[in-house]
């Protein structure tokens, strides 16, 4: 199975200069925030695969024009084939804007998911906008990761934790992937194809 993870920037190879052959094997698209809704709708329609997303701190138009044919995964656990996929939107609070949460608010949100995770099973993949604290994050308030995500990773040991929010150009794919316990934490900035 191939999963296309996207975040933070519209990539010409996926939009204006789209080459269907290059992405023919993609089975699922996961959006990790800060992307125009029409970009997500275009990918879901063109690739003809499910697209699940979480909103980032700059996703202001989603209330009035959500991406057609896509599923907002925030606070949801869904099954795709044999994979349980969990989503959590937003970034750390820094200016009282939308999809911004304090550490305490995010921890409470995760606690409320416990029953759902107990009933449906642990997540195989978690998608978020912000990274876990100390993994790919930065020190300014806006770009700090959530400590609560580290607890989520430790408790449930998902195969993948995929995030956006941290803008980096990667010279190779190993730079965007960090192991935390048994979980591959992947920065999806731009796009990244994951083979499962």
Image (tube, helix red, strand yellow):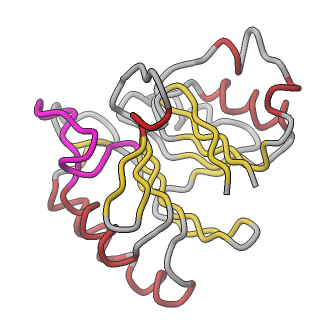
Q: Position of residue 130 (x, y in %)?
A: 33, 43
The C terminus sits in image quarter: bottom right
Q: Position of residue 157 (x, y in %)?
A: 40, 73
Looking at the image, which residue is at 44% across and 29% down? 60
Above/below status of 88 relative to 56: below
Q: Horizontal placement of 12 versus 129: left or right?
A: right
The stretch drawn in magenta includes residue 137: yes
Task: Specify the quadrant of the image occupied by residue 142.
Answer: top left
Looking at the image, which residue is at 16% across and 31% down? 95
Looking at the image, which residue is at 86% across and 41% down? 48
Boundaries of the magenta span = 129-146
Above/below status of 128 relative to 125: above
The stretch drawn in magenta includes residue 61: no
The N terminus sits in image quarter: bottom right
Q: Horizontal placement of 28 versus 176: left or right?
A: right
Above/below status of 137 relative to 191: below
In this view, the residue farthest toward the bottom is 119
Q: Position of residue 155 (x, y in %)?
A: 32, 78
Q: Horizontal placement of 173 versus 19: left or right?
A: left
Above/below status of 12 relative to 71: above
Q: Horizontal placement of 143 versus 170: left or right?
A: left
Q: Nearer the viewer, residue 11 or 170?
A: 170
Q: Nearer the viewer, residue 139 or 77?
A: 139
Q: Main secondary structure of the magenta part?
A: loop
Looking at the image, which residue is at 18% across and 47% down? 134
């Amino acid at each position: 199975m191939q999963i296309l993870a996207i975040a933070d920037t519209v990539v010409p190879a996926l939009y204006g200069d789209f080459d269907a052959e290059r992405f023919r094997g993609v089975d699922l698209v996961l959006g990790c925030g800060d992307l125009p809704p029409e970009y997500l709708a275009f990918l879901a329609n063109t690739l003809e695969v499910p697209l699940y997303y979480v909103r980032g701190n700059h996703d202001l138009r989603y209330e009035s024009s959500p991406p057609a044919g896509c599923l907002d995964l925030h606070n949801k656990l869904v099954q795709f084939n044999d994979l349980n996929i969990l989503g959590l939107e937003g970034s750390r609070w820094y200016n009282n804007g939308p999809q911004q949460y304090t550490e305490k608010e995010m921890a409470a949100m995760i606690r409320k998911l416990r029953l759902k995770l107990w009933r449906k099973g642990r997540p195989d993949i978690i998608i978020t906008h912000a990274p876990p604290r100390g993994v790919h994050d930065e020190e300014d308030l806006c770009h700090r990761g959530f400590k609560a995500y580290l607890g989520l990773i430790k408790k449930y040991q998902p195969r993948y934790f995929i995030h956006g929010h941290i803008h980096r150009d990667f010279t190779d794919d190993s730079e965007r992937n960090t192991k935390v316990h048994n979980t591959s934490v992947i920065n999806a900035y731009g796009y990244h194809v994951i083979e499962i």
